[in-house]
Image (tube, helix red, strand yellow):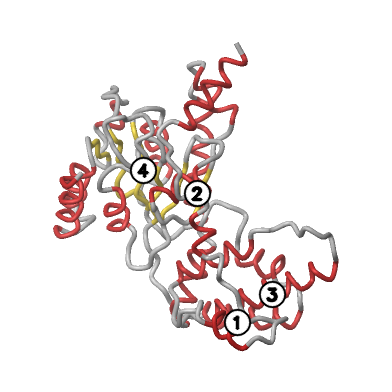
Amino acid sequence: MKGILILILVSQLSSGCKTNNFGKSRQLFSNFTTVNLFKNDKNQTKKSSNYYNLNISAYEAKMKIDILCQKRENIRKNIAINNIHDRSTALSIIKTLELMTKSERANFLRIYDSGNHKNTIKSLLSQEIKHEYLRKRAEDLINEASTIHIKNERIIVSDLDNTILPSNDPSVNGYAYPGTIKLLQALDQKIKGDIHIVTARPFGARNALNSAEVEYNSISYGNICGIATWLLGFQNSIKERKIKNIRKLMDRNTKSNVILIGDDRQVDAEVYLQIIKDYPDRVEAALIHNVLEKKLPDAFSKNPRSIIYNDFSDAADSLHSRGIITKRQSEEITNTVGRN
């Protein structure tokens, strides 16, 4: 029985998850370096400097720093090599901060601290910039930006499978449902970087999202226990974990409203109903993709914030009618759905 459950679990996690662009985010920024500290080749140094774009956006900076902070084990366990790597990483982080305008840097501080993960500005300074002089320089750049007033924007919390990815829908040919990118872009307001994925999957979301070319801020995972109990017909474990993960995001973004996007395959409607009860003034809309045409709780279906949709064209119409997106954005989403 245990072996059968494991096989089913692997099948559930892998179905519909095409990942030809494996590690795309790492490849995208693999050439991102600061100065060439140890080579005197002028051409090489000039080439390295071309990887920087002046006035990079807050989201680009976040992604670059995320890549820089991913620990890579040195082939040789050598203290000197580790120190060189740490210093190079710190210099790269500082250079990234310098390349943003003050306003972009202020927005970077907001989106960097907004995700449901351990990465924060505080941990960035304490763990990634270990040299006192370099840390002081980074702190000066951060403190300079922290005094700038910025507008808080909504966050978007989305499920993954059968919401963004057509994991169990053979009728859809592609990595994402038609209209996904346009809809997420429309909901993510002026400053990109407020899309957060909350999934029941215990792993594997990052590569699937990269394949679908979804630009996101953070991923909150489920666990093996939750999937196993769901396969046995018990859904409380998935429900409670999703509620917990969304509450963390809400509590990290106390001044932001939220739009929730999920589907009817598991317990998203029940989860979102609880979030609406917990944060009644902050939920702009809760969308459920009608995949199985399963009966949803009456309390959710009748809630004025709920939107039950068949495809993203339906969703766009409802969002436009409520003033959440513009007519032009709605038409762009509908046109994208129609072309597929």
Which of pointers 3 and 4 lies earlier in the amino acid sequence? 3
User: Looking at numbered disc 2 in the image, what kind of residue is underneath it?
Assistant: Phe
Q: Mark 3 to mark 1: distance in Å? A: 16 Å
Which of pointers 1 and 4 lies earlier in the amino acid sequence? 1
Residue at 29% of width from left, 46% of height from top?
A: 285
Q: Mark 3 to mark 2: distance in Å? A: 26 Å
Q: Mark 4 to mark 2: distance in Å? A: 12 Å
With 191 as the anchor, is 31 left or right in this view?
A: right
Between residues 45 and 159, which one lies in front from this camera angle? 45
Q: What element carries label 1?
A: helix
Residue at 44% of width from left, 48% of height from top?
A: 209
**Dot 3: within a 10 Å radius of its alpha carbon, few (fewer than 14), some, or many (20 or more) residues?**
some
Q: Which mark is residue 88?
A: 3
Residue at 53% of width from left, 48% of height from top?
A: 248
Q: Which mark is residue 44?
A: 1
Cβ atoms at labels 2 and 1 below 8 Å apart: no
Residue at 58% of width from left, 21% of height from top?
A: 6
The image position of residue 167, as x and y in percent, is 38, 33
Q: Quadrant of the N terminus?
A: top right
Determine which residue is flagged by label 4: 175
Q: Is mark 4 on a helix, strand or loop?
A: loop
Residue 54 against residue 180 in the figure, above or below: below
Q: Mark 2 to mark 1: distance in Å? A: 28 Å
Determine which residue is flagged by label 2: 22
Cβ atoms at labels 3 and 4 below 8 Å apart: no
User: Looking at numbered disc 1 in the image, what kind of residue is underneath it?
Assistant: Gln
